[in-house]
Image (spheres, rainbow, N blue to C red):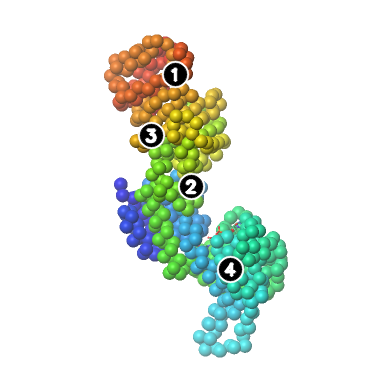
Amino acid sequence: MTPRVLISDQLSDAAVAIFKERGVEVDFRPGIDKDELAAIIGDYDGLAIRSATKVTAKLLENATRLKVVGRAGIGVDNVDIPAATARGVIVMNTPFGNSITTAEHAIAMMFALAREIPAADASTQAGKWEKNRFMGVEITGKTLGIIGCGNIGSIVADRAVGLKMRVVAFDPFLSPERALDIGVEKVELDELLARADFITLHTPMTAQTKNILSAENLARTKKGVRIVNCARGGLVDEAALREALLSGHVAGAAFDVFSVEPAKENPLFGLPNVVCTPHLGAATNEAQENVALQVAEQMSDYLVRGAISNAINFPSITAEEAPRLKPFIALAERLGSFAGQLTESGIKEVRITYEGAVSGLKIKALTAAAIAGLLRPLLQDVNVVSAPIVAKERGIAIEETTREAEGDFESLVTLTVVTERQERSVSGTVFHDGKPRIVAIKGIKVDAEFGPSMIYVTNEDKPGFIGRFASLLGDAGVNIATFALGRDAQGGSAIALVEVDGEAPAAVIDRIQGIAGVKQVKPLRF
Ligand SMILES: NC(=O)C1=CN([C@@H]2O[C@H](COP(=O)(O)OP(=O)(O)OC[C@H]3O[C@@H](n4cnc5c(N)ncnc54)[C@H](O)[C@@H]3O)[C@@H](O)[C@H]2O)C=CC1
Ligand SMILES: O=C(O)C(=O)COP(=O)(O)O
């Protein structure tokens, strides 16, 4: 089925063109009302957004077909990521496409503050010619404090150094080498507050950064400081900043983002030394073209080819990797499903070993597939995106190991599931025909493809079992498609893995259970 994408925010036309080129059906509905969005979201595989659309848990409940949310931009705080992950929806952004533009906006805002350009403009155009009213400050030689020195913060630092500013940065994740590289002095927050003439914020909104400029921290700033926020509303306590501006402690503030958006009213509005723009940080032709192209390419790559890049909730898979990974994803999922269908008590631990060529693939994705396969018979609504989180929530420990090929196979994946009662392992590979095969169960060699309907039997290795088993199926009108056998030693433990046409009735399974020497019988579906 042709994938369908809905664009619900104002994206450049470039996105529509890319989707069409890539064979994705696209509906362009920028500014769509939220109730209407909720009513139609169930028809789409992809949703392309900027910051206006709120992707809430409630909206996602209706998004039964949705596979990917693509954010044409950086911040994904308008997307409920845990809810998307729980529903198996990939959330991707475009982490670099608008960073230069946003850094330039922060610099523009700094100049606007330093020279009161908006107020001077309004006064001049009102015919007042107030040449003596506007006395600015020079920025050369001043100290700029950058809170959050990632992509955008670093570009701001680079421009500010070019403007002959001294730059200090507070960012717990900024390495001293990187700080040296970009020409900033790494400092603690208190020192930044005490030293900066201008402060600019460039962190995401997190529990740690919310109100990072609180009333308390604003009081620690240098008198006459000017504050720029082009990152996220809520990083600065707006009411406290209003007080600090009114008291004259803070000389000016330039804000592009607000704690409530669209900001129709705000504690900062109306103060003389405040400059505001309506979340224009990313609003240039260049940035919008970049992010629209990129998000459309990323979303199409995922929907059409299974490639994943810049996903917030899943490891990246390149378009080259995707076809090589696909049969191993199918293998991992089926090995997981095999183990999951046999598991009857609580899972404590899962160990997955990747041997040989497969160990060079994106094993995080394979592990996620194995866990999804394992949990699905027990929990239903789980997929490769949500599985690792679901496993974690249930306290299931997951261990991955990679090593060189040791046995007969170029690639071998072994899944070991430890439950409260026992430990069970199952191994598989993918042959050159691209079909996943099961090659060992509990260390006993077998060789079977996965069929839609199978019967798994463990028994004592005694003469007569196979004949009885086969005729029992035959008598019940159940046709055997394939028959794989294995045993650990003569007279030891044996297994049979049989593919049958259609489902074996429960009564037949009971009768197989009754054959002498049979320990376990389980119908399986793949
Ligand atoms: N106004 C606008 O239109 C735009 C706003 N943005 C916003 O700008 C912000 C920054 O974007 P990028 O630089 O691309 O992100 P980034 O992830 O590259 O950088 C963020 C930096 O903040 C640092 N950080 C995280 N927690 C911190 C803490 N508690 N204290 C200090 N630093 C902390 C991180 O270590 C990282 O270096 C985001 O919130 C993004 O949403 C981005 C584009 C446009
Ligand atoms: O990319 C970001 O984080 C932004 O804040 C840009 O927002 P926008 O796409 O302009 O609504």
Q: Are marks 2 and 1 in contact (CB under 8 Å)?
A: no
Name the residue carrying label 2. Answer: 314
How many neighbours does mark 3 have within 10 angstroms: few (below 14), some (14-19), or many (20 or more)?
Answer: few
Please tell me which residue is depicted at 44% across the width and 34% down the height of the picture: 410
Q: Compared with residue 501, is residue 24 higher up or lower down, i.e. above or below?
A: below
Q: Position of residue 248 (x, y in %)?
A: 68, 74
Residue nearer the viewer, 516 or 132: 516
* Mark 1 secondary-structure assignment: strand
| Amino acid on which the number 3 mark rests in the picture | Phe
**Viewer-proximal residue, 65 or 419?**
419
In the rendered image, which residue does mark 3 sit on?
431
Report how far apart the C-alphas of labels 4 and 2 lie in the structure.
Answer: 32 Å
**What is the count of numbered marks?**
4
CA distance for labels 4 and 1:
68 Å
Q: Please tell me which of labels 4 and 3 falls first in the chain.
A: 4
Question: Would you call the spot at circle 4 few (<14 residues within 10 Å), some (14-19), or many (20 or more)?
Answer: some
